[in-house]
Image: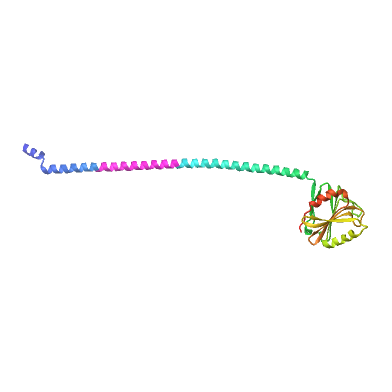
Amino acid sequence: MDNKQSSQTQSTPENMTAQQAQLARRVQQMQTNQAKLKHKNNSGLTKTLVIIVLALVAVAFAGLFLWMFTEYNTLKTDYDADVAAEVAKAKDEQSIADAYKCQEEKDFPYKVFAGPVDYGELNFEYPKTWSAYIAKDAANGGDFEAYLNPVQVEPISNSAVNALRVRIVNKSFDDVAKEYQRYLENRNNPLNVESVTVNGTTANLYYGTIPSTELNGYILIFKIRDKTAFLQTDSVLFKDDFDRIVQSIKFNS
């Protein structure tokens, strides 16, 4: 019996080889599991590092965006403030300019007389204390007539004295000059003439006794397009005003 038990527990070469093979498989399995575990750990670490890097990049971009947005708001605020300041300055300057212009207009002692547009748009400056009366406006053609005088215009007649008479007639300058030439040749009518320039145009200035009246004054005639303009003062007392009016004459040829 003892011999039988001894034979059962005694190891044989075949049993040893099987045990070694089984042990080797276990060792190999353990190594494989360790390798997988190491790979898994490495993969997890890589993912963690990637997430950290992406998070840092996102934070950096967010910070950059906030900085750029802040800078933009600052620049825009400064720009808007500069624009508002320039606008306010321009308004102030315009207000000052308007105030000066208004004051100059108040201080300027003259008004502007404007004749018919179709008749060359004759205009000149006259004292603002004078009144003006348009007797014929030539709206439907014909002659244009206007009278100007300090305070109020005197009744229209050959004997009444007005500071200025303005006429534009449908006659040529040459025909009107011929009519006045007859007065110049009449010794009983003391009248003189001299050539002057008005708005770049040659004009005749007559002075002495005004034809068909007993008034002593000045008459200026000049060509406007196909018509002739007359400016007349009925008294030498208005000579200075008349001279300034003549100097300010403008018209479209």
Quadrant (top left/top right/bottom left/bottom right) for the N terminus: top left
Quadrant (top left/top right/bottom left/bottom right) for the C terminus: bottom right
In the visual, does 250 lie left or right of 13?
right
Residue visible at 19% across and 42% down in the picture: 24
Residue 119 position within the rendered picture, expressed as x and y whole percent measured from the top left: 79, 59
Specify the segment rendered in magenta.
32-60
Nearest the viewer among 192 and 33 is: 192
Residue visible at 79% across and 57% down in the picture: 202
Residue 171 visible in the displayed image: no
Can you tell which quarter of the image residue 96 is in? top right
Q: Residue furthest right?
A: 188
Nearest the viewer among 151 and 66 is: 151
Can you tell which quarter of the image residue 92 is in? top right
**Colour mapping:** rainbow
Looking at the image, residue 169 lies above or below residue 238: below
Residue 85 position within the rendered picture, expressed as x and y whole percent measured from the top left: 62, 41
In the visual, does 59 lie left or right of 78?
left
Residue 207 position within the rendered picture, expressed as x and y whole percent measured from the top left: 87, 54
Look at the magenta stretch and give its main secondary structure. helix
Residue 218 position within the rendered picture, expressed as x and y whole percent measured from the top left: 86, 53
Nearest the viewer among 188 and 134 is: 188
Residue visible at 26% across and 41% down in the picture: 34
Whether residue 49 appears in magenta in the rendering, the answer is: yes
Whether residue 87 appears in magenta in the rendering, the answer is: no
Residue 107 visible in the displayed image: yes
Q: How many marks?
A: 0
